[in-house]
Image: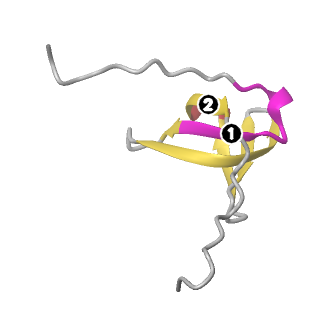
Amino acid sequence: MSGHFAARLVVSITPADVGQRISLRRRLPTGEYSDVVGVLESWSGKLLQVRRRTGEMVEVPEDIVVAAKVVPPQPPPRRRPRGQD
């Protein structure tokens, strides 16, 4: 048995998911992959706009998306217990 595994890449989002938090994987011109997680702000024509939690807007052409899905909302920030610094 080899040490390689294969993953099935599925795009399971549609323009109806605008407003939802998503995770998508895109293929870069170098052949590498890059992930983007954030709120799908718009899907107009063949361009997706995703707002990361930092506020950065990322534009992703539809034709380079290789996998995508809706994910749960970002959890609230954890609070540190009192007296621990």
Residue at 85% from the left image edge and 28% from the top image edge: 16
- Residue 28: give x, y in percent of width and height: 47, 42
Residue at 77% from the left image edge and 25% from the top image edge: 14
Q: Secondary structure at mark 1?
A: strand
Q: Which residue is more in the foreground, 3 or 43?
A: 3
Please, what is the three-letter code of the amino acid marked with disc 2? Ala
Residue at 61% from the left image edge and 31% from the top image edge: 68
Picture quadrant where residue 11 is located: top right
Label 1: few (<14), some or many (≥20) within 10 Å?
many
Q: Secondary structure at mark 2?
A: strand
Residue at 52% from the left image edge and 44% from the top image edge: 35
Query: Tags 1 and 2 in contact by the CB under 8 Å rule?
Result: yes
- Residue 47: give x, y in percent of width and height: 73, 39
Using the numbered discs, state the Cα–Cα distance from disc 1 to disc 2 in whole angstroms.
Answer: 7 Å
Magenta span includes 56: no
Q: Which residues are magenta?
A: 13-25
Q: Which residue is more in the foreground, 48 or 35?
A: 35
Mark 2 lies on residue: 68
- Residue 43: give x, y in percent of width and height: 80, 37
Q: Residue furthest top?
A: 1
Please, what is the three-letter code of the amino acid marked with disc 1? Ile
Mark 1 lies on residue: 22
Asked whether, in this view, residue 33 is left or right of residue 4, the answer is right
Asked whether, in this view, residue 78 is left or right of residue 2, the answer is right
Picture quadrant where residue 81 is located: bottom right
